[in-house]
Amino acid sequence: MSGMRTHTGSVRNFWLFRSGALALVALLMGLIVSVGWGSVIAHPTLLPQARAHDVVMNAQPADGATVQSFPSQIVLEFSAIPLDSFNTVAVSNTDTHEVYFTTEPTFDQQFAVIPVPEGLNPGPGNYTIGFQITSSDGHATRGKTTFTVAGANPAAADPAVDSETTTASGTGTSSLVWVIIGVVLLVVLAGVGLLLTRKQPEQSGTTSK
């Protein structure tokens, strides 16, 4: 009888280990999916973009450029020719969000030409050119470009530098997390493989004397 009890206990332990290993794999897979979606939510640019929507290919002033004076004309070159309806461009201060003017651009093929109101010269600072157009596919599309007029307070540029540093650091941390998860998953899968390939304790009706 003691041999039968020992055999029964071995079988029970085998199935307990197997069930626990499978549950751990399921937990890790759920963690990986959660981390993946978290990365997408934190970095929406990881999502596939709709190629049919028109995007800015070039701009004057160039996106992110520093110029010596406020422009008298702004030009946005799109990837296709937007439809001639419900197109708007607004120029504002990036830091204070003050809107200097809003206008409907004139299109020459895929080039949107935006004349700046005469006499408008807000001086050194950071500026945003925001636009809403009707893309060539018929969908409303929003976007923006930015530029800086030289002479702005250097302190205003520091957050951008810090943001780039944080982004780079965050990218490195994210990569490390994925490596750790991958290693743990491989170890667990190896353990599960060993458990599944082990022979189930042979049943025997022989009892100890």
Image (cartoon, grey):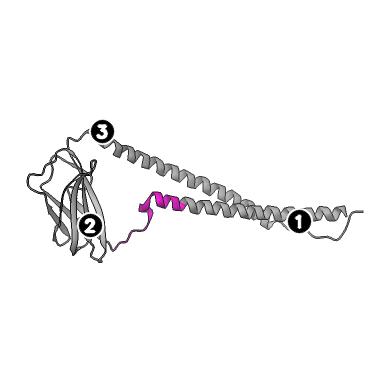
Q: Does residue 37 appear left or right of residue 64 in this picture?
A: right
Quick one: which residue is furthest to the left in this view? 118
The amino acid at mark 2 is Gln
Q: Secondary structure at mark 3?
A: helix
In the image, which is nearer the foreground, mark 2 or mark 3? 2
Residue 60 in picture, x, y percent from top left: 16, 49
The amino acid at mark 1 is Val
Q: Main secondary structure of the magenta part?
A: helix
**In this picture, is 122 found above or below 141?**
above
Q: Secondary structure at mark 2?
A: strand
Which residue corresponds to mark 3?
Answer: 155
Name the N-terminal-most of marks 2 and 1: 1
Name the N-terminal-most of marks 1 and 3: 1
In the image, which is nearer the foreground, mark 2 or mark 1? 2
Residue 78 in picture, x, y percent from top left: 21, 58
Residues under labels 1 and 3: Cα distance? 69 Å
**Which quadrant does the N terminus fall into?**
bottom right
Other-residue count near label 1 (Cα within 10 Å), few / some / many at <14 / 14–19 / ≥20:
some
Magenta span of residues: 36-51
On the question of residue 189 being in view, the answer is no
